[in-house]
Amino acid sequence: MKRMTSGGIFEDKIGYCRAVVAGGFVHVSGSVSPGVDVPEDVIAQCEGALGVIQTALEDAGAAMSDVVRVRYLLPNPHDFEPCWPLLRATFGDNPPAATMISCALIDPKYKIEIEVTALAPDQ
């Protein structure tokens, strides 16, 4: 098992890793748009979260095309549809199984959180 950190502000506060490579998979924790100045636009936040995920996958030797499962968490379910074109561009050629959940997030400034599970590279 390999545990990977990214230096995200909540990793030490809460006690988790950005990603864990185990059992043939890369499990990437729920990710939000990085930084202190989080954009208000849900599409920009979605893009930021996907960037965090892409970096974590690349650090594990995987890619977005290896994603087999994605979960989208949004406080406002109406914010999901504007993200669809970006998500289609990201996963369209290699669509994973997906779930969208409407729920509160750790800070009200966040409009979307995304977590993925991807196939790990051959060890």
Image (cartoon, grey):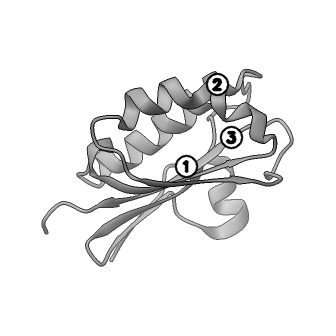
Which residue shows up at 80% across the image and 54% down it?
Answer: 103
How crowded is the residue under tag 1: few (<14 C-alpha within 10 Å), some, or many (20+)? few
Above or below: residue 72 compared with residue 34? below
Residue denoted by label 2: 82
How crowded is the residue under tag 3: few (<14 C-alpha within 10 Å), some, or many (20+)? many
Residue denoted by label 1: 7
Q: Quadrant of the N terminus?
A: bottom left
| Amino acid under disc 1 | Gly
Which residue shows up at 25% across the image and 62% down it?
Answer: 120
- Which is more foreground, mark 1 or mark 2? 2
Number of marks drawn: 3
Q: Secondary structure at mark 2?
A: helix
Which residue shows up at 43% across the image and 31% down it?
Answer: 88
Q: Secondary structure at mark 3?
A: loop
Above or below: residue 1 compared with residue 59? below
- Report the Cα–Cα distance between label 1 and label 2: 29 Å
| Amino acid under disc 3 | Ile
How crowded is the residue under tag 2: few (<14 C-alpha within 10 Å), some, or many (20+)? few
- Which is more foreground, mark 1 or mark 3? 3
- Which is more foreground, mark 2 or mark 3? 2
Give x and y (percent) for residue 79. 73, 32
The disc at residue 112 is 3
Q: Quadrant of the C terminus?
A: bottom left
**Dot placed on the residue nearer the N-terminal end, 2 or 3:** 2
Q: Nearer the viewer, residue 80 or 36?
A: 80
**Dot placed on the residue nearer the N-terminal end, 1 or 2:** 1
Give x and y (percent) for residue 37. 74, 24
| Amino acid under disc 2 | Pro
